[in-house]
């Protein structure tokens, strides 16, 4: 029988989704499962988004231009303008989700065998994008005990080799909730200039900041026009994960010309979903929607962090942004613990599903005692889920047979 490819053999299964069969089994057994493993907000998508789709849903459902509909690009340009970011149509491409935007960026600036720097822990699918494009992730270590702040410039520069072509980072951060300071971003910009690297910023959680923190865009940093690449998505800010609408943007014409070739090869981004976005961004409601949603996530963040602080042996930093917290648990193998919660534990016939954090790292052995918690449920459900987690952690750590 012919063999499958190297890519197929090496690309990892998603740690966010791979335990779904166990959750399905728990539900079939009559348990309620609180899903804190995946970044799927439970807040209803704005009505205006669906109105735009309904108004466009007639006649022939045609391909959109490979770059995206002109009206969508114009609406996005107006959205970015509210952050002081000026972009023309030819400096943006509508992509099939943020995932495609990241893949296009990597394909545009790296060759097979190259490498990129990424602060770890990082969004686990970066591993998959790197393996698919044939490049390597070289991790920049950050630690829960330090609030996942970036190390100093010297430490980052020590990681640079001739194979390194770019620095990819998420701000605000998934899975850590960190929001990088102006000084941290300026330091990354200095490294990029000094070593002739691209700076790729995943900014899908731009609005999700708390306690006065502010996410500075890579396109707001001075003198980076030739090397700054923004990747973005509407999934989170408009609670529209299934729409699969993302953006890649850069002032570098060569990057955008290259990305457009990849966009043409996949033909077009989703058509109806772009009409939903156009209608929403032209309405007067989307900014109110985002403000109310961020206020709700701040309440959820406060609840989850407060409950984690009550759990013996748990180490975590209060997130400044996004809607995740990475917590270090008093266990040897967090994946074993997460599996056990689904297969062997329940409280009042309820259990909880988390994302083991080891595969959010590129360094072997790191993150084995950590989990990512997505606080995407309403506060009542979160309160119950955190009680289940607390009692489950106590039961697990007090049962030696459960430690592996």
Image (cartoon, rainbow, N blue to C red):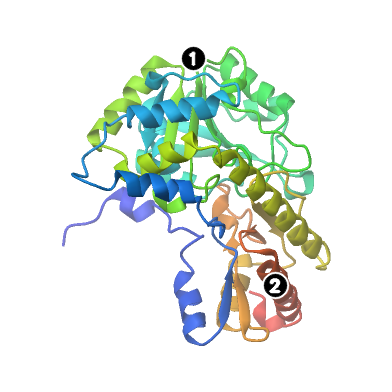
Q: CA distance from mark 1 to mark 2?
A: 47 Å
Q: Residue 391 has which mark? A: none
Q: Front-most of 76 and 404?
A: 76
Element on which disc 2 rests? helix
Q: Position of residue 263 (x, y in %)?
A: 29, 32
Q: Position of residue 112 (x, y in %)?
A: 35, 33
Residue at image position (41%, 21%) is: 91
Q: Front-most of 48 and 78?
A: 48
Q: Residues within 10 Å of mark 1 (few under 14, many from 20)?
A: some
Q: Position of residue 121 (x, y in %)?
A: 61, 47
In this picture, residue 118 sits left or right of residue 258: right
Q: Where 211 falls versus 304 (above or below)?
A: above
In this picture, residue 60 sits left or right of residue 34: left
In this picture, residue 29 sits left or right of residue 344: left
Q: Residue 226 has which mark? A: 1
Q: Which mark sits nearer the N-terminus, 1 or 2?
A: 1
**Can residue 362 be seen in this snapshot?**
yes
Residue at image position (38%, 52%) is: 10
**Can residue 113 be seen in this snapshot?**
no
In this picture, residue 299 sits left or right of residue 351: right
Element on which disc 1 rests? loop
Q: Front-most of 66 and 342?
A: 66
Residue 389 occupies quadrant? bottom right
Residue at image position (55%, 37%) is: 284
Q: Where 177 falls versus 206 (above or below)?
A: below
Residue 179 occupies quadrant? top right
Q: Which residue is mark 2?
A: 389
């Amino acid at each position: 029988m012919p063999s499958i490819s190297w890519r197929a053999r090496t690309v990892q299964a998603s740690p966010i989704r791979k335990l779904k069969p166990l959750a399905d089994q728990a539900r079939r057994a009559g348990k309620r499962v609180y899903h804190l493993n995946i970044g799927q907000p439970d807040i209803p998508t704005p009505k205006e988004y669906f109105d735009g789709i309904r108004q466009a849903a007639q006649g022939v459902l045609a391909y959109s231009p490979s770059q995206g509909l002109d009206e969508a690009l114009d609406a996005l340009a107006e959205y970015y303008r509210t952050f002081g970011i000026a972009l023309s149509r030819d400096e943006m491409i509508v992509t099939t989700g943020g995932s495609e935007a990241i893949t296009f960026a990597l394909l545009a600036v790296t060759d097979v065998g190259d490498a990129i720097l990424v602060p770890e822990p990082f969004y686990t699918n970066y591993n998959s994008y790197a393996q698919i494009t044939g490049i390597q992730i070289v991790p920049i270590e950050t630690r829960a005990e330090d609030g996942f702040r970036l190390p100093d410039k010297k430490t980052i520069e020590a990681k640079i080799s001739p194979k390194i072509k770019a620095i990819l980072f998420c701000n605000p951060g998934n899975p850590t909730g960190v929001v990088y300071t102006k000084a941290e971003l300026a330091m990354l910009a200095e490294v990029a200039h000094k070593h002739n690297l691209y700076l790729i910023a995943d900014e899908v959680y731009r609005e999700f900041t708390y306690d006065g923190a502010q996410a500075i865009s890579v396109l707001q940093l001075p003198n980076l026009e030739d090397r700054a690449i923004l990747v973005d998505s509407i999934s989170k800010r408009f609670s529209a994960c299934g729409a699969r609408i993302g953006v890649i943007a850069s002032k570098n014409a060569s990057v955008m010309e290259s990305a457009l070739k990849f966009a043409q090869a996949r033909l077009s981004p989703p058509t109806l979903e772009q009409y939903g976005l156009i209608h929403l961004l032209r309405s007067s409601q989307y900014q109110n929607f985002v403000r109310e949603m961020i206020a709700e996530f701040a309440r959820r963040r406060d609840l989850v962090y407060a409950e984690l602080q009550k759990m013996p042996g748990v180490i975590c930093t209060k997130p400044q942004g996004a809607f995740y917290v990475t917590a270090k648990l008093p266990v040897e193998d967090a994946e074993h613990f997460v599996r056990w919660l689904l297969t062997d534990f329940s409280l009042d016939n309820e259990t909880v599903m988390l994302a083991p954090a080891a595969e959010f790292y590129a360094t072997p052995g790191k993150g084995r005692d950590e989990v990512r918690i997505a606080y995407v449920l309403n506060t009542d459900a979160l309160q119950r889920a955190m009680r289940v987690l607390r009692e489950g952690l106590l039961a697990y750590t007090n049962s030696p047979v459960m430690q592996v």
